[in-house]
Amino acid sequence: MKNKLLAATLGILLAIGCIGISVSKVSAEPDMESTVEAEETEESAEAEEEETVPEEDADTVPEEDAEAEEKKEEETEVKAESEEKEEDAEITGMKITLENELQADIISVEVAAFSNEVYSENLLKKDQIFAAGESCTIGVPEEFQDADLGMYNVRITLADGSIQEIPLVPLLENVIGTVYPDNGIVLIRVRDERLEAEAEPVSEAEIQQTEAEASQIMAEILSAELE
């Protein structure tokens, strides 16, 4: 009988021990899950911080690139202006602007004073091509300038090697000469923007009066010839 009671008691104690162990395990599992969740939350926070830093850098880099690009453009503009000034400084003598309205490129421009048959050297820059539709500035050396009449013979060479001579071209400092074709020959039309700006517009009445005076003069000449 005692043995039976002892065995029953041991069985009850073992059952109670198993229940306690199970309860401790169950109570321990939430703690472990909480720890895992905390670690995962901390890792995600660190990952967000790491992702945030590149975003700030990404916002900063384009601004730096824009500033660098703007600085580069300014340097390019300054360089272009400097080169233009240097080119103007290289041109010596009487400066003349030419416009090429031909259908061909010009590779040489030479001038000679009307009273002198000797032409200058090519007044274009070395290896310069005066392309059709463009303009360029040349300088007439002092030894080839016509101080008396201001009239010049101009000789141009086209890209195909053909040479065109244009006589009696009135050239002055800073005038504009347009090279253009006319009935199979090449001419230069010269204009001075300073004089054009100062010139007063001619009225219709003045034009009619001039035409009437010219007609009267022609009539008188014809009458004199008939008499």
Image: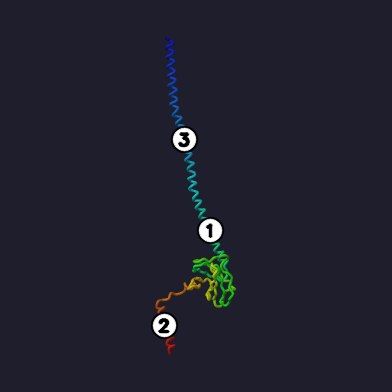
- Give the residue number, with chain letter if any, for mark 1: 76
Of the numbered discs 2 and 3, the one sitting upstream in the chain is 3
Viewer-nearest of discs 2 and 1: 2
| Residue count near mark 1 (Cα–Cα under 10 Å), binned few <14, some 14–19, many ≥20 | few
- Measured in 3D between alpha carbons, the distance from the residue under mark 1 to the one under mark 3, in whole angstroms, is 54 Å
Nearer to me, 193 or 220:
220
Place of residue 150 in the rendered image (x, y in percent of width and height, measured from the top left):
54, 76
When the figure is inspected, residue 60 is found, relative to residue 111, above or below; the finding is above
- Mark 3 burial class by Cα count in 10 Å: few <14, some 14-19, many 20+: few
Viewer-proximal residue, 112 or 62?
Answer: 112
26 to 100, vertically: above or below: above
Please tell me how crowded label 2 is: few (under 14), some (14-19), or many (20+) other residues with Cα within 10 Å.
Answer: few
Task: Indicate the position of residue 182 as horizontal and vertical percent values.
Answer: 48, 73
Residue 54 place in picture, x, y as percent: 49, 44
Q: Mark 1 vs mark 3: give the one in front.
A: 1
| Disc ID at residue 40 | 3
**Label 3 SS:** helix
* On screen, residue 78 above or below 144: above
* Colour scheme of the rendered structure: rainbow
Q: Could you tell me which quadrant the N terminus lies in? A: top left
Disc 1 + disc 3, Cβ < 8 Å: no
The mark that comes first in sequence, 2 or 1, is 1
Q: Which residue is mark 2?
A: 215
Kind of residue sitting beneath label 2: Ser
Q: Quadrant of the C terminus?
A: bottom left
Which residue type does callout 3 highlight? Glu
- State whether residue 107 is above or below residue 3: below
Q: Quadrant of residue 144?
A: bottom right
Residue 20 % position (x, y): 44, 22
The kind of residue on which mark 1 rests is Thr
Give yes or no for contact between labels 2 and 1 (Cβ–Cβ under 8 Å): no
Q: Secondary structure at mark 1?
A: helix
